[in-house]
Amino acid sequence: MIKLTNLFVSLFYSGYIKTIPSGTFGSFVSIVILLPLIIFNIISLELFILGFIIIFLLSLYFIKEFSSYNKSHDSKVIVIDEFLGIYLILIFFEQIQIINTYISVFLIFVLFRFFDIVKIFPANIIDKKLNNALGVILDDLVAALYTIISLYILNAYY
């Protein structure tokens, strides 16, 4: 079970990469995994959303397990939270796409990483006060929401 937990929370062990910050690499891997599903309409939006919910619930369990045996709250190895953040953004991809796919993906990546690192309210409070699996995930979902809002605003002026 430990191997499955590691595989899941580290997003196929991408959280163990040491040459690039794990959150940045995890975000990149997340885009590589998820973007084709949206771009090529491999699954419907409804199934995509259902997948998000299932992965979110599984993440709560596996992060709790990982933190329990690893004796850490929010290990750098855990990048499934970045995956969920990118996933949430891509649910809105059709509405937030700017100019073309490449520019949109670049902006998604840069804005998400910015908001994830800076942790603007309420992400900063969640990160400090909610010391459980939900807290690990929620600060990234807040960063995703800020990214979505920013891209909606950019779209309004473009």
Image (cartoon, helix red, strand yellow):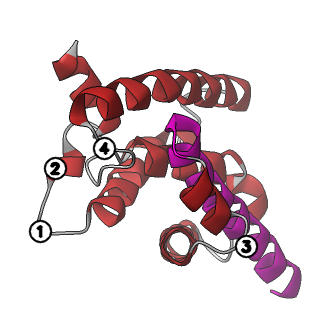
Label 1: how many Cα within 10 Å (few below 14, some 14–19, many 20+):
few
Residue stretch rendered in magenta on the structure: 131-158
**Magenta span contains residue 17:** no
- Disc 2 target residue: 16
Q: Is residue 155 magenta?
A: yes
Q: CA distance from mark 3 to mark 4?
A: 34 Å
Graded by Cα atoms within 10 Å as few (under 14), some (14 to 19) or many (20 or more), the crowding at tag 3 reads many
As helix, strand or loop, the secondary structure at mark 3 comes to helix
* Label 4 Cα crowd, 10 Å radius (few <14 / some 14-19 / many 20+): few
Residue in the image at 63% along x and 59% along y: 144
Inter-mark Cα distance, 1 to 3: 30 Å
- For residue 72, which numbered disc appears in the image? 4
The residue where tag 1 is placed is: 19
Q: Which residue is mark 3?
A: 151
Magenta region's main secondary structure? helix
Q: Answer with mark 1 or mark 3, whichever residue precedes in sequence.
A: 1
Mark drawn on residue 135: none
As measured in the structure, the alpha-carbon distance from the residue carrying label 2 to the one carrying label 4 is 15 Å
Spatial CA span between label 2 and label 1: 9 Å
At x 52%, y 45%, the residue is 131
